[in-house]
Image: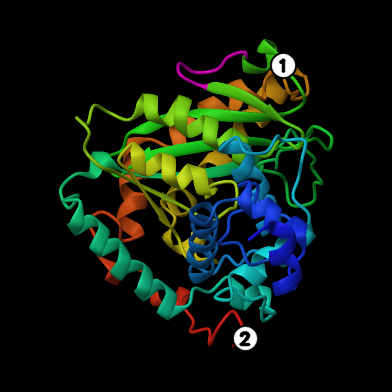
Amino acid sequence: MSQRKAALQFNVPRQTLRDRITGKISPDCVTTGRAPVFSLEEEARIVEHVKSMASYGYGYTRQEVTDLATDFAHTIKIKPRSEEFTLRWFEGFIKRWPELRVVKPRSLEILRAKCGSVANVEKYFASLTEVVLKYNLQDKPHLIFNVDEKGITLNHKPPNVVSGIECTTSSVTSGRSSTTTILGCGSASGFAVPPYFVFEGKRLNNELMKGATPGAVGAVSDSGWSNTNIFRQYLTDHFLKYIPGRNNDNVLLLLDGHKSHVAVDIIEWAQEHHIIIHVLPAHTSHILQPLDVGCYGPLQRIYDNECHKTIRKNSSVITKYNICELACKAYQKALCPENLQSAFRKTGIYPLDKTVINQDQLKTIRGIYKK
């Protein structure tokens, strides 16, 4: 029958029929309004990612899910960077996926948050053991890496000095300054990937890298902190270049759940390049992250001492143009083979042994999220 007759007989708007006949809208579509930007498969990838991160204790807010979708849409080239999703998109998204829900997290006192949940640590080691056995990494410490960020400033902490009992002493430091981030990485065998610096600014000035050690690289961001784009660039252009020859062997990469580290496309890129990304549980970096446990403490102390020596010898202040040279010296000493091997051993990663974790640091937490 004609469109007009069908519209009258079945009480369906004529334009609705016309759109489906011409193919403008799929006949299977039963919802009103605009079609979703993502395909069903693409949205499913976002859903699985959000659920996975929540299971590690990194629950996303509404806005963070929206930002995650914006970044993903830009990466797969279905939406320009200038066009951002809004919370209105999130409302439609959450309705399409009833398996997701918005819950109120339970507040944790800072002291409790710093204590690892026994259940989370047990789950982490069970998962880590499964990965190590599946990819046959039990005796391959050169293929087990940890990457983490470390923020440094010009205003260093002066070291302790010797003084008379009745004397009051002081030490010169630089004024308050912006943060420069170091992306550091090392393996269980003791190999350190050259440092990757993130300076605050709009354009990288070559003078900022003056005195850098071989292989060190610099980038800039508005805040001086890493972000998703910078971390993606770090993995593709820096980390991949310095992984020792592996003949397509699988590499295990341990990192925390910071949102810049675990964008949907980064996880998928890693899988394509035989890199297994394993996320540490929330609030456990001080217990389970090798660089935090055995390297970044010494790095900060060595950096502070280098700054102190420079000021005393040259009678000058630390500026953004010599921070790289001083940080590189500290990085080389702090991420030495002995420290890296010890850090992976203390965190029970290599050799794989959960019993080395100090039980005094663990405290049972009934649950981060309300049911």
In the displayed structure, does residue 50 sit left or right of residue 254?
right
Residue at (38, 29) in percent of width and height: 240
Q: In this orientation, does residue 194 appear?
A: no
Q: In this orientation, does residue 30 appear?
A: yes
Secondary structure of the residue carrying numbered label 1? helix
Give the vertical position of 157 relative to 20 (above or below): above
Return the mark for residue 370.
2
Q: Residue 144: image x %, image y %?
A: 30, 45
- Mark 2 packing: few (<14 Cα in 10 Å), some, or many (20+)? few
Q: Is residue 55 magenta?
A: no
Return the mark for residue 284.
none
Q: Quadrant of the N terminus?
A: bottom right
Mark 1 near mark 2, Cβ–Cβ under 8 Å?
A: no
| Magenta range | 210-216
Secondary structure of the residue carrying numbered label 2? loop
Residue at (42, 61) in percent of width and height: 288
Q: CA distance from mark 1 to mark 2?
A: 57 Å
Which numbered disc, 1 or 2, marks the residue closer to the eye?
Answer: 2
Chain-order first, disc 1 or disc 2: 1
Q: Residue 176: image x %, image y %?
A: 83, 38
Q: Nearer the viewer, residue 17 or 4?
A: 4
Amino acid at pointer 2: Lys
In the displayed structure, does residue 126 sit left or right of residue 267?
left
Residue identified by numbered label 1: 314
Q: Nearer the viewer, residue 356 or 262?
A: 262
Q: Quadrant of the C terminus?
A: bottom right
- Mark 1 packing: few (<14 Cα in 10 Å), some, or many (20+)? few
Q: Residue 271: image x %, image y %?
A: 35, 44
Residue at (32, 41) in percent of width and height: 338
| Quadrant of the image occupied by residue 269 | top left
Amino acid at pointer 1: Asn
